[in-house]
Amino acid sequence: MKRSKAGKSWPTHKLENALICDFLGLPGNSTSNSSRDPIHMEKLVEKVWENWGIGEAETPEKTISESWQQIVGPKLAGKCAPVRLSNDGSTLEIRAVSGTIKQELSFCRSALLKKIQKLNNCNLISKIRIS
């Protein structure tokens, strides 16, 4: 097999193809067929759900996201959002669209924290970081 680039052509080597396939995570040009049976869609979906944690117990992040409008109110809900919890689960980072919204959130930080701590699985959150 030959490739051309800018009018030049050169032979493609099996080793080169194998290296490229390995690098890209693609199957090689082997002629043997896989002896595996196809995976049923139901099992595939179950595996994806398991890997992504879908259907498991509620996490603090999920609880906060679902309750965000009740926590900050409809006026601020579209102008800020929860971004992440710290690794130890004690600090919630909130991203705001402007300095004005950051300042408004900082004024009501303690009230927001109290609302968040009342939610399921959120009692360990003790700080709010606004960015």
Image (cartoon, rainbow, N blue to C red):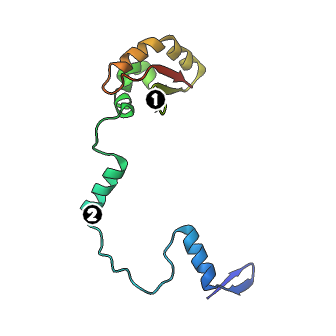
* Residue found 30% across the figure and 72% down from its top: 38
Q: Classify 98 as above or below 45.
A: above
* Residue found 29% across the figure and 75% down from its top: 37
Question: What's the distance in space between the residues labelled 2 and 1, CA to CA?
Answer: 34 Å
The quadrant of the image that shows the N terminus is bottom right
Q: Residue 40: which quarter of the image?
A: bottom left
Q: Residue 59: which quarter of the image?
A: top left
Residue 95, image x and y in percent?
52, 28
The foreground one among 10 and 62 is 62
Q: Classify 24 as above or below 52.
A: below
**Left or right, 2 with reference to 32:** right
Give the residue at mark 1: 82
The foreground one among 54 and 68 is 54
* Residue found 32% across the figure and 76% down from its top: 36
**Left or right, 36 with reference to 82:** left
In the picture, the disc for residue 41 is 2
* Residue found 50% across the figure and 26% down from its top: 94
Q: Residues within 10 Å of mark 1 (few under 14, many from 20)?
A: some
Q: What residue type is disc 2 on?
A: Met
Residue 61, image x and y in percent?
39, 33
Labels 2 and 1: the sequence-earlier one: 2
Q: Classify 127 as above or below 6.
A: above
In the picture, the disc for residue 74 is none
Q: What residue type is disc 1 on?
A: Pro
The quadrant of the image that shows the C terminus is top right
Q: Classify 22 as above or below 15.
A: above
Q: Residue 100: which quarter of the image?
A: top right
Q: Residues within 10 Å of mark 2 (few under 14, many from 20)?
A: few
Residue 67, image x and y in percent?
34, 26
Could you say whether the residue bearing mark 1 is in a helix, strand or loop?
A: strand
Residue 13, image x and y in percent?
64, 85
